[in-house]
């Protein structure tokens, strides 16, 4: 969520940045990565200084204006040999393919932020009210509005998922990792298409429902870590730290 659109200073540290810095993670994948173009905001320089434990970084810009840059990013303790964007049309969403060298092994990592549902705050608020009061008279009206928006988003994500799946099949690395915000559930077409023969780390080693989105009663697992079968995942966890509209997901992995 753009680091909650908050600055990071010694007197007022950004909790999301602190969480990442303290995580001990070797590889960090971020969606809705946003930096300010003005010194009084969260600039790239401030962010890189706070996350100096990650010497290798790749930022793929998806949208920008005179105030900020928005994209997806990879921060790594292992060398990033190559990075490129997967070419599909979207104003604010996107995917990127990265080739990393991890202790002499070649890893292809694909970071994703698939198309969102485009629901307004009013849509979300109405949905939340109806879930809290199933007898609401506004159900029919909201149903029509949601169907139109969700249907369009499902179609867009389907095409994006097919392009990501193609990249997975053509991956040159010995090992494959796919992660990010799919904006869809584990039983969706987008998730099934991307997963293919990959292992869902949370399904394999997590506990519970793994709900990763935490706003307006849209309680779903829409964030994922997937990997090739020659990778073993352990303790895949959705960390219930409410610093943004998504809970972070992490897990340990072994390259077998």
Image (cartoon, helix red, strand yellow):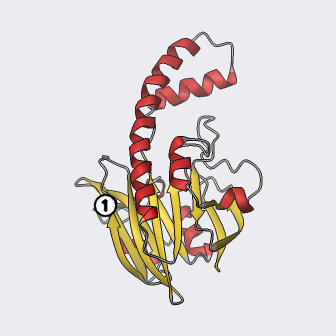
Residue 177 x, y percent position in the rendering = 53, 68
Number of residue marks: 1
Q: Is residue 10 left or right of residue 212?
A: left
Q: Is residue 245 visible?
A: no
Residue at x 35%, y 77% (from the top left corner) = 82
- Quadrant hosting residue 26: bottom right
Q: Is residue 63 above or below residue 102?
A: above
Horizontal side of residue 147 vs 253, given as left or right: left
Instruction: Name the one closer to the observer, 96 or 6.
Output: 96
Q: Position of residue 251 (x, y in %)?
A: 66, 68
Looking at the image, the residue that sits furthest to the left is: 66
Q: Is residue 47 above or below residue 145?
A: below
Q: Which one is in front, 202 or 125?
A: 202
Outermost residue toward the right? 207
Residue nearest the viewer, comparing 39 with 78: 78
Asked if residue 157 is positioned above or below residue 194 in the image, the reply reads above
Secondary-structure class at tag 1: strand
x, y percent for residue 215: 59, 40
Q: Residue at x 65, y 56 (%)?
A: 241
State the residue at coordinates (36%, 68%).
59
Image quadrant where one finds the C terminus: bottom right
Q: Residue furthest bottom?
A: 104
Residue 163 horizontal/vertical position (percent): 39, 53
* Residue most extreme to the top: 137
Look at 63% across and 42% down and name the residue there. 220
Report which quarter residue 22 is drawn in. Answer: bottom right
Does residue 156 appear in the picture of this structure?
yes
**Label 1 crowd bin: few (<14), some (14–19), many (20+), radius 10 Å:** some
Q: Quadrant of residue 196?
A: bottom right
The residue carrying mark 1 is 61
């Amino acid at each position: 969520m753009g680091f909650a659109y908050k600055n990071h200073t010694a007197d007022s540290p950004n909790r999301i940045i602190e969480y990442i810095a303290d995580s001990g993670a070797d590889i960090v994948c971020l969606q809705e990565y946003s930096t300010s173009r003005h010194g009084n905001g969260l600039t790239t320089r401030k962010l890189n200084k706070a996350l100096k434990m990650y010497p290798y970084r790749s930022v793929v810009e998806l949208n920008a204006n005179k105030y900020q840059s928005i994209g997806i990013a990879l921060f790594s303790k292992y060398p990033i040999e190559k990075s490129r964007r997967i070419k599909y049309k979207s104003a604010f969403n996107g995917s990127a393919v990265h080739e990393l060298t991890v202790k002499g092994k070649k890893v292809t990592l694909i970071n994703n932020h698939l198309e969102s549902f485009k629901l307004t705050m009013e849509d979300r608020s109405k949905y939340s009210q109806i879930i809290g009061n199933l007898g609401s008279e506004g159900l029919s009206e909201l149903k029509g509005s949601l169907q139109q928006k969700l249907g369009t988003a499902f179609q867009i994500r389907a095409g994006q998922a097919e392009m990501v799946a193609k990249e997975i099949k053509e991956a040159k690395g010995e090992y494959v990792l796919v992660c990010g915000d799919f904006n869809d559930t584990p039983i969706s077409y987008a998730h099934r298409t991307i997963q293919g023969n990959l292992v869902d780390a949370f399904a394999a080693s997590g506990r519970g429902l793994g709900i990763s989105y935490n706003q307006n009663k849209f309680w779903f697992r829409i964030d994922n870590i997937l990997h090739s079968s020659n990778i073993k995942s352990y303790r895949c966890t959705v960390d219930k730290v409410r610093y943004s509209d998504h809970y972070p997901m992490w897990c340990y992995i072994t390259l077998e």
